[in-house]
Amino acid sequence: MVYIETYGKEIVSLLVPLIAWVLNRFFKSKAKLEFASTHQFTFIVQQPLLDAQGNQISPTQTVRTNSIIVQNSGREPATKVELVFNWKPMFLNLWPVRHFTEHLEPDGRNVLIFESLAPGEVQGCEVLSVNAELPSLITVRSTECVAQSVNMYPQRVVSNTVRRVATTLMFVGLGAAVYFAIILVQFLVIRTPLGH
């Protein structure tokens, strides 16, 4: 405790640039892409699969689906957003509907390119295949960043009252943390001897 009292000003002067760097590094406005597979399912359809001559190949058919969302959770627009699939999906549905360009690479990879995603904007992508595997989503990227894969699960919807109470408590907790940080700085500066 004597060490902190003696060198309090020096410790605070070292912490200020560190705090400024953390605020600049982690809270700076930028685009931040995230993607997740919200739902996958395989349907067994009780209808025989027939070849061109009418011969039964399989007594059932398989339909596979995958629901993917891409979100810009940053504070700046993400431009030239690319979704790269292992191969061209058999069926593809985008929601909300928007313009995109599509490229088929020489190795068979399928690339969907969107001009931009605004901050907070979400793009849904539904993929479906019949009697075939679904292509994997290899990567999502933009000019500003590479998307991060996040896990999703269904969540119960809570009332507005519960959300307001939780927000108020978090705000009070943040205010208390700032208050105690100021008290600590005052303690370090006031208790420090003037000769140092």
Image (cartoon, rainbow, N blue to C red):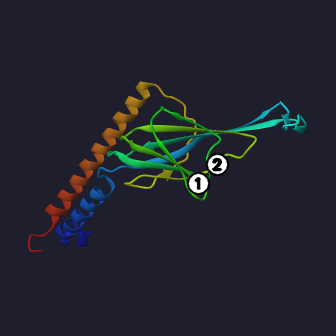
Q: Is residue 130 left or right of residue 84?
A: right
Locate residue 129, reporting x and y percent: 69, 40
Residue at image location 22% in from the left, 68% down from the top: 14
Amino acid type indicated by mark 1: Arg
Q: Nearer the viewer, mark 2 or mark 1?
A: 1
Residue at image location 28% in from the left, 56% down from the top: 23
Q: Which disc number belongs to residue 109?
A: 1
Q: Is residue 82 left or right of residue 58?
A: left
Residue at image location 36% in from the left, 36% down from the top: 169
Q: Is residue 166 left or right of residue 188?
A: right
Q: Identify the secondary structure beneath mark 2.
A: loop
Is 23 above or below relative to 153? below
Residue at image location 46% in from the left, 25% down from the top: 159
Locate residue 93, reporting x and y percent: 57, 35
Is 26 above or below relative to 101? below
Residue placed most toward the observer, 79 or 110: 110
Query: In the rendered image, which quarter is residue 42 located in?
Result: top right
Is 29 above or below relative to 47? below
Q: Residue furthest left?
A: 195
Amino acid type indicated by mark 2: Pro
Q: Which disc number belongs to residue 135?
A: 2
Is 29 above or below relative to 189? above
Locate residue 88, reporting x and y percent: 61, 47
